[in-house]
Image (tube, rainbow, N blue to C red):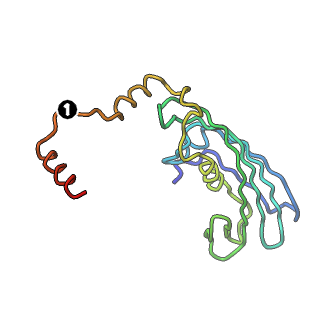
Amino acid sequence: MMKKEKQKLIIPFVGLKPGLHRFEFEIDSTFFEQFDYSIIKEGDFKIKVDFEKKKNLFNLNFKIKGKITASCDRCLEPLTLKVKGEESLIVKFGETTFNETDEIKVISPAEYELDLTNDIYQYAHLLMPTKVTHENKKDCNPEIIEQLYKLTTKQESKKVDPRWAALSKLKDKSE
């Protein structure tokens, strides 16, 4: 999934006392470049992580705020989206390292730091809207909108294929 090790978002939890701790991370476009097939090519994010250390687990609450530069799905012009969101994660210790669900992560008891790189990558992508367009159609490139209109409007053909005309007669009789 990752191309090369560039930027890791790590919390070294071994020396932390039980209780609430706050961590802040900033990521930019270079963070997303390290992943193959990232939908986000350009973006700047600030991530605040409230990290609660307990005896057998960690509770993490993420507050993510940022800007993403993407192409409009309607006119393909670049636009900047402001996004923000919150996520939570529970980290447990266990013999097998795997993700039980999206909200629970199991790590080995031998671990001494928590790598949040993939989690934050996924959270940033969840903030992307399903349809990326300018808020107002007026902000789209007018030349592209005009071309789309020409291609999508149905132009009635004056010539009717005789086979279709015969089928239309059958349709009219059955009604």
x and y percentages locating residue 44 in the rendered image: 66, 38
Left or right, 108 with reference to 52: left
In the image, residue 46 above or below residue 2: above
**Furthest residue in direction bottom, as rendered:** 95
In the image, residue 58 above or below residue 33: below
Closest to the observer, 82 or 32: 82
Residue at the location (79% across, 60% down)? 13
Which part of the image, by quadrant, shows the C terminus? bottom left
Quarter of the figure with residue 41: top right
Closest to the observer, 114 or 127: 127
Residue at the location (66% across, 52% down)? 120
* Mark 1 crowdedness (10 Å alpha carbons): few <14, some 14-19, many ≥20: few
**How many discs mark residues in the rendered view?**
1
In the image, residue 151 above or below residue 107: above
Quarter of the figure with residue 134: top right
x and y percentages locating residue 37 in the rendered image: 48, 47
In the image, residue 98 above or below residue 139: below
Left or right, 3 with reference to 113: left
Residue type, numbered disc 1: Lys
Q: Secondary structure at mark 1?
A: loop
x and y percentages locating residue 123 in the rendered image: 64, 52
Closest to the observer, 11 or 51: 51
Q: Which residue is mark 1?
A: 158
Residue at the location (41% across, 25% down)? 146
x and y percentages locating residue 40 in the rendered image: 56, 42
Closest to the observer, 48 or 56: 48
**Furthest residue in direction left, as rendered:** 162
